[in-house]
Amino acid sequence: MHESHESTACGLTSIQALGNLLAAKGLLTSTANLPADPVAVCGAACDSRAVQPGHLFVCKGAHFDVRYLQAALEAGACGYLCDTTLAQRLADEAPSVPALITSDVRSAMALVSAEAWGHPDQRMHVAGITGTKGKTTVAYFVRSILDRGKPGSRAASIGTLETYDGVERFASRNTTPEAPDLWRHLANAANSGLDMVMEVSSQGLKYQRVEGLAYDVAAFLNIGVDHVSPIEHPTFDDYLSSKIKIFSNARVALLNAQLDPAHAEQIEQAASACAQTLHFLACEKAGQDAPKAEFLATNIRAQNGGMSFVAHTPQWSAPVQIALSGDFNVENAIAAIAIAQTMGCTQKEIVRGLATASVPGRMDVIRGADDHLTAIVDYAHNGMSVRQVLSSVRASYPTHRIIAVFGATGGKGAERRFEMPPAAAPYADHLIFTEDDAGPEPVERICAQMAEATPKGTAHEIVLDRTQAITHAVAMAKSGESPCVVCVLGKGSETRQLRADGPVPMTPDTELVRALLGAQSLTPNKTEGAADGI
């Protein structure tokens, strides 16, 4: 934890002081309508609906609508920040309003947001987690551990599924929010006496959403090809270079000891900017040939629908149990142990927290009335995660037929539709391609491309409607003579399907599968002790 900082209050800073800060960083192009007396600032927002009196409003985007500025001013904004391309248009719209004009609105937005919200990261522990897969699971594990440390309270979290900061609670729109929203959540959490566990996306790192945020520990779980598209990362190098920015302002770097050798040196070099670098590893037993790691999981076993293992840290060794199945979740758990211990958690808190941890939509095991049919719902949505989940299912159910239902996103992550079918084919007996946030693209085209990418000899079909696809898979499983596992991948407990005209409601995969099987999950739906909806 960092040194104590004065509590956030209106008047903690001023527009004039923020202008001086930007000028010192070479980001201030000009100002407008700044009076002689300080104009107090007590926060920042880039969404006019989030503006409170005394906030600085950030105007950004090539298609920014001046009506948003008017709404922000009506809500009490004391001034605005914009880049040079918007300056004249906004000056014409609000000729007497104090304004800061910058050459780089993203960097400027991050700097002024941290200052306007009073640098709450200096009053709390903050853990940042990045990686191609596993971020959400590790974050939920860490949050459950932290909750054991403060009875009656809970850790704050920002991530793919949800945002909770002690004041606000809602389904997340972005894994890593824009800087003004991020710093508001940090301020809410710090003022509520909570620590923050946050997933950090490559987009959040690339576009400076977390610039200046001080992490107690920054965890790098893994790296694989994902999010490479014209609207995300144009190349894998851009994706990786964005990911490793997480180490630029962290005290401790935590790395997977088994990173892809092709990229390990670059990641280790970036991590060397931190005061300390630690490593985690999950393996059957430690030996001379195993990579060196300060945090180690050994004696890994499947047990009671979950996993058991022995955790070894620099301070202690102890048996640990988790409710999620799969060796890869042991890797997630040992990463969470390393993060939690770095944040000051005890052995007792860690072991208890992991034993009661669950992740909505992650390896949710659902069984029918007999052993003939089992369903597993998981968020796996790229080649790496699909391979991990299905290989684990095949190992756990070696004599069962496996049917996998999944789709691929449209408008981004285009590589997924070509990587997921080959990743699934070695482990599944039948593949069903369906809708999964097709967005601006025709779902028919995405599914056709997935069919084309399917290895020859792999049974597959296309059922465009997701509900019908899952229903069809369960009917196939019930009608077959041999025991079957239906794996429904990609959406988990999500309640919306993204289409060209926007999001539409959908029945979550978990609820639909339970209804079709007339059963309940073997995996808990939420962490013990968590507030409803969190």
Image (cartoon, grey):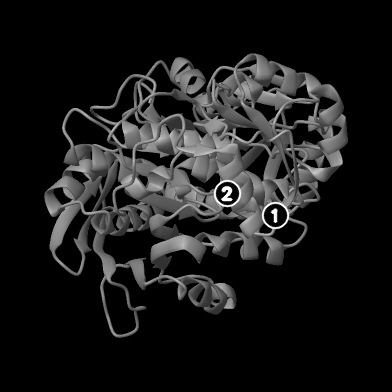
For image coordinates 68% across by 51% down, the residue present is 227
Q: CA distance from mark 1 to mark 2?
A: 10 Å
- Taking depth in this image into account, of 284 and 503 the one nearest to the observer is 503
Label 1 Cα crowd, 10 Å radius (few <14 / some 14-19 / many 20+): many
Q: Residues within 10 Å of mark 2 (few under 14, many from 20)?
A: many
Image: 39 above or below 145? above
Q: Which of the 4 quarters of the picture holds residue 338? A: bottom left
Please state the horizontal and vertical placement of residue 23, each as a whole percent of the image: 66, 55
Q: Report the residue marked by disc 2.
A: 111
Quadrant (top left, top right, bottom left, bottom right) of the C terminus: top left
* Residue 528 at x, y percent in the picture: 24, 29
**Do callouts 1 and 2 mark residues in contact (Cβ within 8 Å)?**
yes
- For disc 1, the marked residue is 27
Residue at image location 74% in from the left, 32% down from the top: 438
Identify the amino acid type marked 2: Leu
Q: Secondary structure at mark 1?
A: loop
| Residue 165 drawn at (x, y percent) | 39, 31
Q: Nearer the viewer, residue 140 or 475?
A: 140
- Residue 375 visible to the viewer: no
Report the label total: 2
Disc 2 element:
helix
